[in-house]
Amino acid sequence: MTFALQSGLFFRRKLLETLRQPVWIITGLSTPLLYLALFEPLLRSVAGGPSLPAGQVLNVFLPGILALMAVGAGMGAGWVVIWELDSGVIERLRVTPASRFALLLGAVLRDVAMFVVPGIVVIGIAIGFGFIAHWVGLALIFVLLALLTAACSATSASLGIRLKQIGSLAAVVTGVQLPLTLLSGILLPLSLGPDWLRVLGHLNPMYYTVQAARDLAAGTITTAAVGTGFLVTGAAAALAMWWGTRGYQRAMA
Amino acid sequence: MPVTEPAQIAIRAHGLRKSFRVKDEAVAAVSGLDLTVAAGQIFGFLGPNGAGKTTTLRMLTTLLSADAGEAFVAGADVMRRPQQVRRRIGYVGQLGGSDASATGLENLLLQARLHGMTAAAAASRAQDLINLFDLGAFAGRIVRSYSGGQRRRLEVALGILHHPQVLFLDEPTTGLDPQNRANLWDQVRQLRDGGTTVFLTTHYLDEADQLSDRLAIIDCGRVIAEGTPAQLKQRYSGDTVSITPAGPPDSLPAVERELAGIPLVVSTRIQDGSIRLAVTDATPALAAIFAVLDAKGIAIRAAALAQPSLDDVFLHETGRSLRDAGSPASGPATPRPAGEQVAA
């Protein structure tokens, strides 16, 4: 009970902080809309064949965009953590009886909200562009990708706590993020690529998230890919949260 | 609740040790520190930068685990019962710790709720503190817009919000102007008068001297002297007399030898063309010094009585001045461990 209350208090604190900086909400929303407006027409012209059926370009493409948004919403967490370490906020909160997991969860939930709300807006717009919505699948996509945001947010926060320097954090996050997203088939299905690329993709946990999201967007809920996706993404989120909580327990900056 | 410590002891530490790894080399920040602080006093922790003050404070406040040793704060074991310690202590770090993107009131309310108060109790306590620290004019504004003094007041309010038995302040007046510094000293004294034990680190000699009821001087991770400011100054330096002979500088050692033989003179040293004599009692010592100078026919250019300071204590123990210690240019200062860099 105390834990739930504390998580709620930390979530509220983070949400207020976000609402006071609307520039981040605008940035978070403009990126996916630019993809829709500027990249989707390109995709439409190369479509055709079994991997990218011409009629359903958006149903293949949109889950990738949503996954990209989910990653983007989470990856900034480390920057916030370093800022809070430098201003002593985390130190002060750590000398209260507050749960360290609640401290992490409050920030993670804010990042999840920063994915879900713009995500719903993007879906609304995409339906106007011809996206065929399967509602149950869509709801499950949001659950799945919220786990992805949680995994990214907790990982970024953990890295922030341990690296303590914005420069080192930026190097690590950008160094990892690009191969991770490219090898997950976020923008185009990896099945379009050569064998070696597909093998590399299978080593990437996010690949399974994106595969599951594609199946869900197509309205097929009971596939093995969906099960694997939830399993891998859920495990990644749990692991990252455990790592992040440990970081808050031991942080010494 | 099992009583593990006598109630009148607020802090007891024994054999505390902590090292940090700096470039694959273990650097000891705190090496075998013993400390006892009685309840209800202002205890100063004085030392140069890098002496281990902050590391010690972080261990006592559960922020950092010790490599060895034990510590009890407000009756609870810091290593085994950190949650109990956190309920009973307040902490105001060097970095402040207020949330710059929230209002002062929001900061107070969150802190109160985290200490287990209901929403109603939190609101009432926040209002008390707003009145006590005179925060009313800006409590509804975002903390980022506060002046340094306003911010520090809010941070001390956050530290004492839950009526802690022991309040830890890490370099509380660094960066404050004289007016705000004096105000903070008054607040700290009021807290002590209300029964709170205040443990504060400082590298300001005058702060340690004027504010502390008792103090410990720390250098290279160890307590090198402990007592009331008056005791320390008396024990280590008594009074200091400075004699400047009229003769050439190379005659100084001979004069020093003559004066060192006087029973009231504890120690002598030559500094800046003068002979500095630590004496037990200035008045009879001066008479004896002049008698010796007269008898030996030594002419002097100046004689002066210097008030002892805590710096004399530090100098006596370490052979260097606290004013110079800790800066990179001054020899044996310890390197700052990586863990403290952010707190600089």
Image: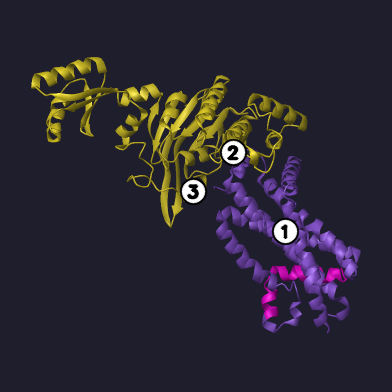
Label 2 sits on residue: B82
Residue A203 in picture, x, y percent from top left: 67, 73
Say what amino acid the circle numbered 2 marks: Pro
Does B40 appear in magenta?
no
Q: Respond whether the residues carrying marks 1 and 2 are from the same subunit.
A: no
Label 1 marks which chain's residue?
A: A
What's the magenta bit mostly, secondary-structure-wise?
helix
Circle 3 is placed at which residue position? B341
Q: Is residue B268 visible?
A: yes
Is residue A66 visible to us here? no
Residues under labels 1 and 3: Cα distance? 30 Å
Q: Residue at x 58, y 63 (%)?
A: A171
Residue for badge 1: A73
Q: Is residue A239 left or right of residue B324?
A: right
Quadrant where the N terminus of chain B sits is top right
Q: Which residues are magenta?
A: A197-222
Name the chain letter of the residue that bears numbered label 2: B
* Chain B, chosen colour in render: yellow
Where is residue B97 shown, x and y percent of the image? 60, 40
Position of residue B252 measured from the top left corner of the image (x, y, whole percent) = 15, 32
Chain drawn in purple: A
* Circle 2: element type: helix
Q: Quick check: B58 above or below A57?
A: above
Q: Are marks 2 and 3 in contact (CB under 8 Å)?
A: no
